[in-house]
Image (cartoon, grey):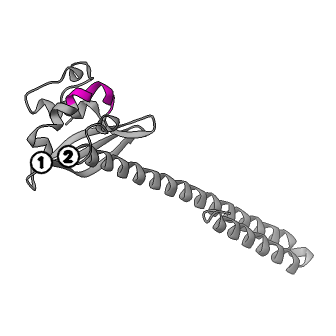
């Protein structure tokens, strides 16, 4: 039995004990009052059980949200980390195979080799899309602060969105061919 259902069983058990005690302790003339009281206790127990089940479901949903937010933050941090091998980065980017050449070109610049990302906020918009607020750090200082971006879930894995990557690359004055076919080449606001 899991810990979320234990309180439900205790409440239901207490209701049965109270009802049984009330029924056996009452005289025949008071049986209808006892039945009414027992019915009220059982109704209260059912209501409490329902509330506890909803709370457990909400807690599970909250844990899932926290895990998704952590996964988005991790993929952003790793994708923009100069220590992450360039060969691994396409797997962290939406439609990454289309961006292999752009990732290699951008990753070989001095700027990319000396920069990192700090994620300050992740907001889940749907099970497969998140809004991300991040800053690009270079030389220990933010050079692009509180930038908006996206993350998408592809095949059950959170990835940096292609449109976010294209928007950042366009800041350098170039637009890789893969970005020409992407849905958007500007960063979302």
| Residue that badge 2 annotates | 82
In the image, residue 145 lies at what x, y percent? 13, 48
Decide which of tag 2 and tag 1 comes sooner along the chain.
Answer: 2
The structure residue drawn at horizontal position 86% and vertical position 81%, both measured from the top left corner, is 25
| Residue that badge 1 annotates | 114
* Circle 1 SS class: loop
**Which residue lies most toward the bottom here?**
25
User: Quick one: quadrant of the N terminus?
Assistant: bottom right
Q: Quadrant of residue 150?
A: top left
Q: Nearer the viewer, residue 82 or 146?
A: 82
Q: Are marks 2 and 1 in contact (CB under 8 Å)?
A: yes
The structure residue drawn at horizontal position 29% and vertical position 36%, both measured from the top left corner, is 87
Q: Quadrant of residue 104?
A: top left
The structure residue drawn at horizontal position 23% and vertical position 25%, both measured from the top left corner, is 184
In the image, residue 98 lies at what x, y percent? 29, 24
Is residue 115 visible from the viewing direction of this image? yes
Is residue 136 visible from the viewing direction of this image? no
């Amino acid at each position: 039995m899991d810990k979320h259902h234990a309180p439900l069983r205790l409440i239901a058990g207490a209701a049965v004990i109270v009802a049984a005690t009330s029924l056996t302790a009452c005289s025949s003339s008071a049986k209808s009052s006892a039945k009414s009281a027992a019915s009220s206790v059982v109704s209260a127990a059912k209501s409490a059980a329902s509330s506890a089940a909803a709370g457990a479901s909400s807690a599970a949903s909250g844990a899932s949200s926290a895990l998704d937010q952590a996964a988005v933050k991790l993929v952003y941090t790793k994708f923009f980390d100069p220590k992450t091998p360039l060969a691994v980065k396409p797997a962290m980017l939406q439609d990454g195979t289309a961006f292999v050449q752009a990732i290699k070109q951008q990753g070989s610049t001095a700027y990319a080799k000396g920069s990192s990302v700090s994620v300050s906020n992740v907001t889940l918009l749907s099970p497969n899309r998140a809004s991300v607020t991040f800053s690009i750090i270079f030389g220990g200082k933010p050079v692009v602060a509180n930038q908006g971006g996206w993350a998408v879930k592809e095949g059950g894995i959170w990835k940096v969105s292609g449109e976010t990557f294209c928007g950042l690359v366009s800041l350098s004055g170039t637009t890789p061919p893969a970005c020409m076919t992407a849905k958007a080449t500007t960063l979302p606001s």
